[in-house]
Image: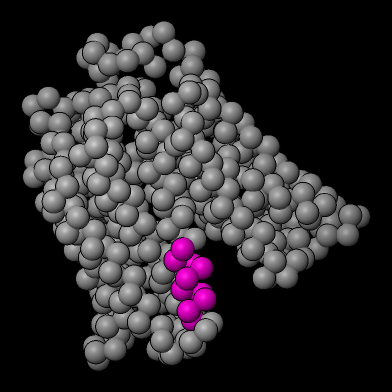
């Protein structure tokens, strides 16, 4: 990559760290919000819902307008929203008559920023001159994982060292990251978006069977990643009977480490690998991990499978981005936005489905009889059954990739108008 674009790449890395801050800081403070403002669990759940829905709305807005207004105004606006929203998380509840309203307003503002960043930084990196696009995309997405780890580690240490009373300073301090990155994006060189008259129309993308498969792969990627990351701590505590501290460390903690390592390793060495084959291997290994998590009799095996699952899902999201971008170089920001929407839908469907199946399984008389024979209660069996449903997503992604690989020698006229690379 030309030297003048290295700072642009650095700014994109910081953009994903900003998104990690937006998504992971507030959950660390939910207990504080509940104790200090006497809000219910349902009101906390509403904050999560507002965050998710607002990001999808931002994705759809980006699909419609970013190619018209350009990358720089959009990415700068995204970082300004993130800065105001994160700072507002520490300020608005303190100064507004209804603290919960302050939390909601701050959540809505930083969610707009996070949603726009999710859509914008990937096409910005994809547009930069240079080879090994898939490696660059994987390395880019690894910074979300490292950002998540930093937010959790630093915030937890500070709250432990200085007490929960300093919580409102944390959002103000983390808001400095998007604030500084705003000024960087004002200066760094950016490639222009695909001109509207040259990009593939959205209707043409949506009519393409190949793009529909890409959307399905993104849904599977989001579901496979979030199902285990959201449920692993509770599964370790309730399903495997380990303590919460060890469940957190060995479940979601190691999951994030392995996911970051996987994306970083592919970011460094991925130019020597075939992306489709690497994705296929990851999907198959992910299926094996889900089977081991739910079916292995030894808790240690299930915990290690949950951790290693982070490595197997690490390539799914950025790899699908890169595969689709290579097949449709004229897709524009709208293509990335639609992929992000599909991934976010998977992020919600997967964990919900696991919870629903867990509740149904606990009402099964057949499972109760099985559990009594093997020394498991219904809570353990329910958690295992719920996570076993997550196996469907890497299996479905495997089927999609096998189809794509079989079409490896077929050009994609639906996407590329005959000009793109072979899939």
Which image quarter: residue 197?
A: top left
Q: Nearer the viewer, residue 276 or 383?
A: 276
Whether 109 is among the magenta residues is: no
Q: Which residues are magenta?
A: 150-159
**Image point (46%, 63%), residue name:** 150
Q: Nearer the viewer, residue 239 or 27?
A: 27
**Image point (13%, 53%), residue name:** 186
Q: Is residue 403 above or below residue 115?
A: above
Where in the figure is residue 63, as x and y percent of width and height?
A: 20, 42
Q: Nearer the viewer, residue 121 or 39?
A: 121
Where in the figure is residue 199, as x and y percent of width and height?
A: 16, 27
Which image quarter: residue 330?
A: top left
Q: How is the image coloured?
A: one colour
Q: Main secondary structure of the magenta part?
A: helix
Question: In this rendering, would 188 be left or right of 363?
Answer: left
**Image point (54%, 82%), residue name:** 160
Where in the figure is residue 388, as x and y percent of width and height?
A: 66, 46
Of all residues shown, which one is farthest toward the right?
373
Question: In this rendering, would 397 be left or right of 300?
Answer: left
């Amino acid at each position: 990559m030309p030297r003048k674009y290295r700072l642009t790449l650095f700014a994109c890395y910081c953009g994903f760290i900003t998104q990690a801050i937006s998504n992971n800081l507030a959950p660390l403070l939910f207990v504080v919000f509940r104790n200090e403002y006497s809000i219910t669990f349902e009101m906390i759940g509403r904050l999560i819902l507002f965050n998710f829905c607002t990001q999808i709305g931002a994705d759809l807005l980006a699909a419609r307008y970013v190619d018209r207004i350009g990358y720089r105004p959009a990415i700068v606006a995204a970082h300004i929203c993130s800065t105001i929203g994160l700072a507002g998380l520490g300020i608005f509840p303190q100064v507004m008559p209804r603290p919960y309203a302050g939390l909601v307003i701050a959540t809505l503002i930083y969610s707009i920023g996070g949603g726009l960043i999710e859509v914008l930084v990937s096409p910005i990196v994809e547009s930069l001159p240079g080879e090994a696009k898939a490696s660059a995309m994987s390395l880019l997405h690894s910074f979300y994982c490292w950002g998540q780890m930093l937010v959790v580690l630093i915030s937890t240490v500070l709250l432990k060292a200085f007490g929960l009373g300093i919580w409102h300073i944390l959002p103000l301090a983390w808001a400095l990251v998007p604030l500084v990155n705003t000024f960087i994006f004002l200066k760094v060189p950016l490639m222009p978006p695909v001109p509207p008259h040259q990009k593939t129309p959205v209707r043409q993308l949506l009519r393409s069977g190949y793009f529909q498969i890409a959307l399905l792969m993104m849904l599977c990627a989001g579901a496979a990643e979030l199902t285990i990351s959201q449920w692993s701590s509770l599964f370790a505590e309730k399903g495997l009977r380990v303590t919460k501290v060890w469940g957190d460390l060995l479940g979601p903690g190691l999951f994030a480490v392995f996911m970051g390592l996987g994306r970083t390793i592919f970011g460094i060495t991925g130019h020597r690998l075939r992306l489709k084959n690497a994705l296929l291997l990851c999907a198959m290994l992910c299926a094996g991990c889900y089977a081991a998590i739910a079916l292995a009799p030894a808790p240690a095996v299930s915990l290690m499978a949950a951790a290693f699952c982070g490595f197997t899902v690490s390539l799914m999201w950025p790899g699908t981005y890169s595969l689709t971008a290579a097949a449709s170089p004229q897709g524009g920001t709208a293509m990335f936005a639609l992929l992000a929407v599909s991934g976010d839908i998977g992020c919600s469907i997967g964990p919900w489905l696991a919870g629903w199946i867990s509740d149904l399984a606990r009402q099964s008389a057949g499972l109760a009889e099985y559990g009594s024979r093997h020394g498991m209660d219904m809570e353990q069996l329910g958690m295992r059954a719920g996570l076993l449903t997550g196996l469907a997503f890497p299996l479905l992604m495997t089927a999609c990739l096998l189809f794509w690989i079989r079409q490896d020698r077929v050009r994609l006229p639906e996407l590329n108008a005959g000009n793109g690379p072979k899939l």
